[in-house]
Amino acid sequence: MREIAVVGVGMTKFGERWDKQLRDLFVEAANEALKDANMERNEIQALYVGNFSAGSFVGQEHVGPLLADYLSLKYKPAFRVESACASSGMAFNLACMAIASGMYDIVMVGGVEKMTDISAPEVTSVHAKAMDAEWESFFGLTLPAAFALIARRHFVQYGTKPEQLAMVSVKNHRNATKNPLAQFQFEVTVERVLTSPIVSDPLHVLDCSPVTDGAAAVILCSAELAKKYTDTPVYVLGFGTASDTIALHDRSDITTLGAVVEASRQAYKMAGIEPKNIDVAELHDSFTITEIISYEDLGFCEKGKGGLMIQEGETEIGGRISVNPSGGLKARGNPIGATGVAQVVEIVQQLRGAAGKRQVSGAEIGMTQNIGGTGSTCVIHIFGRQRR
Amino acid sequence: MREIAVVGVGMTKFGERWDKQLRDLFVEAANEALKDANMERNEIQALYVGNFSAGSFVGQEHVGPLLADYLSLKYKPAFRVESACASSGMAFNLACMAIASGMYDIVMVGGVEKMTDISAPEVTSVHAKAMDAEWESFFGLTLPAAFALIARRHFVQYGTKPEQLAMVSVKNHRNATKNPLAQFQFEVTVERVLTSPIVSDPLHVLDCSPVTDGAAAVILCSAELAKKYTDTPVYVLGFGTASDTIALHDRSDITTLGAVVEASRQAYKMAGIEPKNIDVAELHDSFTITEIISYEDLGFCEKGKGGLMIQEGETEIGGRISVNPSGGLKARGNPIGATGVAQVVEIVQQLRGAAGKRQVSGAEIGMTQNIGGTGSTCVIHIFGRQRR
């Protein structure tokens, strides 16, 4: 397959963005990516957009041409991809295949979500559309409740503790204080997490990623073209995508996310690397338990040892594998459709050595892991400073 | 680019399918496609699904893994693509690029929509999400009203008449009587169309495609593999995709759909053919005026002569270019997310010579043209009995 590089990245401030509409947020991120790549907009041949549920959040489907229009990409093809929280990770994956096919040489991939225009209970209902409407959400199961079940079972099966979950939140909040675009730029303590209100036992509000408005965009091109646009291209070394049952109750073991195991197997194979080669990773910490289980399912540690891995500081910036230096979904924020591409933005900045105060020293290989729903989708990309 | 073939097709009966859920409809179509291709489900490497707004119609986003799950495609990647009425045409296009890239050899592309679980006024509101939420639907513009504006302007500019619009409906209803899977299997007359209730002047209810439940699925593989599965593969000769402004009022001339002109230009070039080489076409007759404008924008006739083209019978089965032998969106039905792939199903059956009573004699080259919203998306594929 033809090799692919990222040559431009852009992202809005994440948070409650009542100053901007969905389309404006996207244009802000996209224009920044164009500027970063020193590129004219007419060089972009196609647009891929990840968006979860603008239809429910702001009454707008057909988001692809809307955003191409507001970005003045006249008549250019515009694809909108939806896969719950993994929407823009999947969009990125499809864009990689389009370049690999030779159909396009240069494309933009973005993600956007505008979530704060409706009330919190309404947001919870929209979130629940990522699960099985007939057999889960119809009966009242919410996304936090599903992950609470997963956490509880992980406690029973592996002895994981609420304090270890809290440590994920503490780390990611600390990292976010070094990220000027993060939604939450304050630190928390284990005690504060454990005394914050319960959302769904054992998950406290500070175990959960927030409701966020925001957008992110990146520009991809064939590896041969990359040096025309930047001195520091970042290459796509490998990827993997997998699905799992839509409903949690159809899995034999809810403490393992099968789609994460399968997608990472594909990605490691394609990149020709092992978990130990990863220097920095943006993982999908939709809830603190999700990050801990991801350590295990990605092979960063043995199954059941995820709690110990956070406790021993192995995933701090500068640890064995730096995880979520951006602050992750927990503290950078989780504008659902934008999250996958925001992860790519961070890894590109890290591999460029341009991540400022949160820079992982000497990072050569990075990973993004983007999950949809309760793990019904997983898409993973592995990036490198050098070509394969 | 690596060449692509269609080796299996399947489709449900279109109509008010209160007997089945969204997932069941899709599984029915998909299983039929597998049977048609003499293929085991584990040979499918990835699933691409077009769906417009299951989030609004049945409270379900994350449709990709849901359908992969119910089709027992364990851990296989599942992509959901949304582009209003062009959703599954765009999904088909992305699947072509995935095979062309070498990433996959065999994939399934499907489309599904379950629209009749909510009331008709609610359906109209969901339809309107395909337009500009902030500048069109917010102020009360509906999709039929937008096409009524287009029709009215076409009357003024080119002298097109209501009777000519009605003739599109008459032709497509007649064709649908020969299609056992069509929603409406009855004929109408010009008089009946013109005396049917007004939806938005000058469009009568019999000028508009209906609200429909249904699913369609096809199996694609690399051209080299095709003969392993079927004696009558149908090859993808070319394609084109384009966007246009989301809002109608931002176009300099609303009687031309710029995305159709641009997408067809790309598709003809890639296939190395001209409009006159097309034997049979499934066009996007969401409204009767849309089919007439499409004749013109696809180069089937001169600009402004679309009304004359239907009047002179040139697009009847066996005419100069047979258009919508399936009955089209008007009479076969328009389950939004399924429509693009349903068009492919028809063209494949026509090129196989397996279209029964509606067979276009000696058809060698066929086209599908799938439009989203008021023409903000257009995706076109050209198919042939022979490889390029």
Image: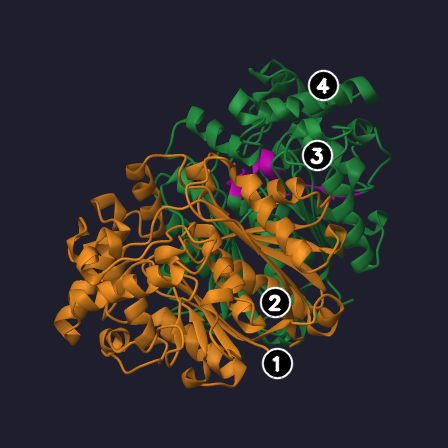
Chain colours: A green, B orange
C-alpha separation, residue under disc 2 versus residue under disc 4: 42 Å
Residue B292 included in the magenta stretch of the image = no
Q: Are marks 2 and 3 in contact (CB under 8 Å)?
A: no
Q: Residues within 10 Å of mark 1 (few under 14, many from 20)?
A: some
Q: Nearer the viewer, residue B73 or A231?
A: B73
Q: Disc 4 or disc 1, which is closer to the eye?
A: 1
Query: What is the three-letter code of the residue carrying label 4?
Result: Arg
Chain of the residue where label 1 is placed in the rendered structure: B
C-alpha separation, residue under disc 2 versus residue under disc 3: 33 Å
C-alpha separation, residue under disc 4 versus residue under disc 1: 59 Å
Residue A333 included in the magenta stretch of the image = yes
What residue is pinned by disc 3?
A: A291
Query: What is the three-letter code of the residue carrying label 2?
Result: Met
What residue is pinned by disc 4?
A: A152
What residue is pinned by disc 2?
A: B97
Residue B235 point in image, percent of width and height: 61, 74
Query: What is the three-letter code of the residue carrying label 3?
Result: Glu
C-alpha separation, residue under disc 1 versus residue under disc 3: 51 Å
Q: Which residues are magenta?
A: A321-336
Chain of the residue where label 3 is placed in the rendered structure: A
